[in-house]
């Protein structure tokens, strides 16, 4: 009991310390919100049952956290940080239940060493809450299979319902659990419990169904297009592109589970499928299914590296159990690999407390790595300066990019609603909100901000141009990107591109 208590304490010391690292990173003054984070924050300012491309949980969490911490970077990112703590905790809990507290400690370390965890626990994206509710539902469903108690299945359904409200890919848990029930020959015995699990889980679909019923089922059309089932005429398969996309996907997945641990992963997987241990197969199955599903998709289109990562958390659980049964040499290797996997991101996230980040090559590399997190507040400050200098009073802000527009809403004083003038991109959430045509014929100033276009290409016509410039924010005197700023007077006509793709 005392030994278990020691492992428990060590786990929490490390987990809280890593959470503190991410809080310090978030509070660095030069670090801004990632563009997707800003978009999800803006959704929370326009609450709805669902949104064009994603379920509502990410917006609900932002609404609640910013009500407490304000519309700040920490107010948004605290959701990811707490999700990361939750992911590590359930991983520790799961491995402790299966293999003992020592394995739980190793599993907790392994989870926090994987780049997949760093992404989900640092930046508040849909993967943050999805990954937490995924590993929680997988754990609770396992307890249901093991103990045959309906209560475990109900709680697994609740966790799955929340996961579905984070991202619809949570649906993969159904075939995962079903395949396992057949594998261990328990389906007939547990079919009523499985039906209860599915029934409770599908309550998480209610917000999506309500919103899509009201909005022409846009989300389902969008997801079908992402899956290659829509969006125009079919095109012949390009073998060159298919190979390139698959190799990009494959290499990305190797990186996302930590290259330092790759030898351990390979040997562990070999042993799992060689011994066919039920517990390890249950943990490996979700990640393998997700990997294969997106690998197949990568043969048809480019797949983002983060799409399957929510399902990889189970890998850390069975690897933790595997490590405690290995030789001292393997355990030493694993510890070194874990330390490297944790230390390198920690140094990267913390402020420059050593001379390392002052080295020009490292400084430039950091700027490139953080590029999408930099310069947004500087841009907003420049716009505030121009507003005062030009004595603007009834201005509205718009861009050709929903990324830029979202950042403007977050960083401009008063958090005004921004607008997107579609100039040829696919449909997005801004196309469903009230657009800037409301300002046609009024006395106002429109501030156009773009990183992609020099002109509005006749999509909007104003009475006159008041001012324009190209602004370049910087990071430690290293230029980040050029931004076109134009201030126009009195919108006369508005004819944006109307997308017919999803």
Image (cartoon, rainbow, N blue to C red):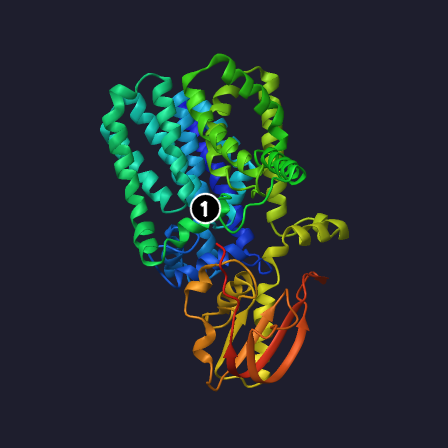
Residue 330 is situated, as x and y percent measured from the top left of the image, at 60, 19
Q: Residue at (47%, 30%) from the top-left corner?
A: 289
Q: Is residue 293 among what the camera can see? A: yes
| Image x and y of residue 105, in percent | 47, 28
Q: Is residue 121 left or right of residue 457?
A: left
Task: Characterize the local packing of mark 1: few (<14), some (14-19) or many (20 or more) Cα atoms within 10 angstroms.
Answer: some
Judge whether residue 81 can be spotted in this image: no
Q: As drawn, which residue projects farthest toward the top? A: 275
- Which residue corresponds to the image point at 63% horizontal and 44% vertical from the top-left? 347
Which sits in the foreground, 439 or 137? 439
Q: Nearer the viewer, residue 124 or 295?
A: 295
Percent position of residue 180, x then y: 38, 23
Answer left or right for 100 relative to 359: left
Residue 409 sits above or below residue 307 on the image: below
Tell whether 164 sits left or right of 444: left
Name the secondary structure under disc 1.
helix
The N terminus sits in image quarter: top left
Q: Is residue 430 above or below residue 292?
A: below
What residue would you read off at disc 1? Answer: 224
């Amino acid at each position: 009991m005392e030994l278990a208590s020691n492992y428990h304490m060590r786990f929490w010391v490390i987990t809280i310390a890593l959470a503190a690292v991410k809080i310090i990173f978030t509070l660095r003054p030069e670090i801004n919100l990632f563009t997707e984070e800003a978009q999800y924050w803006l959704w929370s300012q326009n609450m709805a049952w669902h949104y064009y491309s994603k379920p509502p949980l990410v917006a609900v969490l932002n609404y609640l956290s910013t009500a407490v911490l304000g519309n700040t970077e920490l107010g948004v990112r605290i959701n990811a940080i707490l999700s990361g703590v939750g992911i590590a905790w359930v991983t520790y809990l799961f491995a402790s239940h299966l293999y003992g507290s020592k394995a739980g400690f190793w599993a907790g370390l392994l989870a926090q060493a994987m780049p997949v965890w760093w992404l989900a626990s640092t930046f508040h994206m849909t993967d943050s809450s999805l990954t937490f509710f995924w590993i929680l539902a997988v754990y609770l469903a396992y307890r249901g299979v093991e103990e045959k108690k309906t209560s475990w299945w109900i709680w697994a359904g609740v966790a799955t319902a929340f996961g579905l409200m984070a991202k619809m890919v949570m649906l993969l848990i159904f075939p995962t659990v079903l395949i396992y029930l057949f594998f261990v020959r328990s389906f007939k015995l547990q079919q009523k419990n499985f039906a209860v699990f599915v029934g409770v889980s599908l309550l998480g679909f209610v917000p999506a169904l309500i919103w899509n019923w009201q909005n022409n089922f846009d989300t389902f059309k969008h997801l079908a297009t992402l899956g290659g089932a829509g969006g125009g005429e079919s095109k012949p398969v390009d073998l060159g592109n298919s190979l390139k996309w698959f190799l990009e996907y494959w290499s990305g997945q190797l990186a996302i589970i930590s290259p330092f641990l790759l030898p351990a992963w390979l040997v562990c997987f070999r042993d799992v499928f060689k011994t066919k241990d039920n517990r390890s197969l249950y943990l490996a199955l979700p990640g393998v299914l997700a990997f294969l599903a997106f690998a197949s998709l990568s043969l048809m289109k480019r797949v983002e590296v983060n799409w399957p990562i929510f399902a990889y958390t189970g890998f850390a659980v069975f690897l933790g159990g595997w490590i405690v049964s290995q030789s001292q040499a393997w355990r030493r290797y694993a510890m070194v690999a874990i330390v490297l996997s944790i230390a390198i991101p920690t140094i990267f996230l913390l402020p420059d407390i050593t001379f390392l980040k002052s080295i020009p090559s490292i400084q430039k590399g950091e700027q490139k790595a953080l590029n999408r997190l930099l310069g947004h507040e500087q841009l907003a400050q420049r716009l505030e300066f121009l507003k005062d200098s030009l004595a603007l009073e009834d201005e509205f802000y718009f861009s050709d990019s929903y990324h830029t527009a979202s950042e403007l809403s977050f960083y401009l004083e008063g958090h005004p609603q921004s607008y997107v003038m579609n100039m040829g991109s696919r449909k997005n959430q801004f196309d469903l909100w009230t657009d800037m045509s409301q300002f046609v014929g009024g006395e106002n100033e429109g501030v156009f901000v773009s990183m992609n276009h020099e002109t509005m290409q006749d999509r909007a016509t104003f009475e006159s141009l008041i001012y324009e410039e190209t602004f370049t924010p910087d990071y430690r005197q290293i230029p980040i990107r050029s931004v076109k700023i134009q201030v126009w007077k009195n919108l006369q006509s508005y004819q944006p591109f109307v997308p017919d793709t999803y």
